[in-house]
């Protein structure tokens, strides 16, 4: 498969150089894991992240939808500089299904300030155990590998957005 990188520095796609803005810090780029292929992408802070594409799979880094996380992909996204909001849910859970559209809308509203993800608590028992998930839905906000906030139970859309705004790391 042409262009396929197995890892290391080669997996980091570098965006083209940005014009210099006097008075602005030249640093502050962030590494954003791709929601489709998990490749690490360097996105300069002054670049419109919503229009950025993955250097590996060419899909948008932000498409306004929550991604599905598994044990295999979880840590790469949880350890990122980009805050990660995880919805632990299950197919049989009525309140989970009730909150799903609000979570979907929140993903579109808050990207690219955070990554939104869903973990199927039945399929991913090890992740549920690691986070001591006792009831679903449970939302866990992570930043650079650390849990920064947690919410158990479904909220109506307006309150959900308010909770995210309050707890989103700056
Ligand atoms: Zn990708």
Image (spheres, helix red, strand yellow):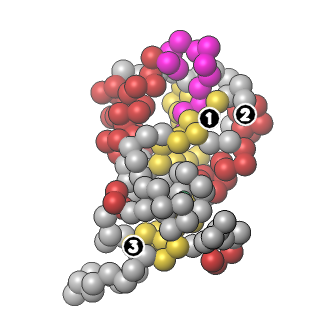
Residue 139 appears anywhere in the view: yes
Marker disc for residue 44: 3
Q: Is residue 148 above or below residue 34?
A: above
Q: Is residue 69 above or below residue 50?
A: above
Q: State the residue position of label 1.
A: 119
Q: Position of residue 98 (x, y in %)?
A: 45, 17
Residue at left offset 22%, top offset 87%? 22
| Quadrant that contains the C terminus | bottom left
| Quadrant that contains the N terminus | bottom right
Residue at left offset 43%, top offset 55%? 60
The quadrant holding residue 109 is top left
Q: Position of residue 158 (x, y in %)?
A: 30, 27
**Would you say 55 lies left or right of 165 here?**
right
Determine the CA span between mark 1 and mark 3. Answer: 29 Å
Residue at left offset 63%, top offset 70%? 2
* Neighbourhood count class around disc 1 (C-alpha, 10 Å): few under 14, some 14–19, many 20 upward: many
């Amino acid at each position: 498969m042409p262009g396929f990188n197995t890892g290391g520095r080669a997996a980091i796609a570098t965006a083209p150089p940005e014009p210099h803005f006097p008075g602005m810090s030249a640093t502050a780029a962030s590494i954003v894991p791709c929601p489709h292929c998990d490749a690490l992408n360097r996105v300069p802070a002054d670049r419109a992240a919503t229009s950025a594409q993955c250097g590996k799979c060419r899909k948008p880094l932000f498409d306004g939808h929550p991604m599905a996380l598994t044990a295999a992909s979880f840590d790469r996204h949880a350890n990122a500089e980009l805050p990660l909001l995880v919805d632990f849910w299950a197919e049989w859970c009525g309140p989970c299904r009730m909150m799903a559209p609000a979570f979907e809308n929140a993903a579109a509203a808050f990207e690219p300030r955070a990554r939104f993800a869903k973990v199927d608590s039945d399929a991913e028992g090890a992740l549920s155990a690691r986070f001591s998930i006792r009831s679903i839905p449970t939302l866990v906000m992570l930043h650079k590998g650390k849990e920064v906030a947690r919410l158990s139970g479904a909220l109506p859309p307006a309150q959900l957005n308010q909770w995210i705004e309050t707890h989103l790391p700056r």
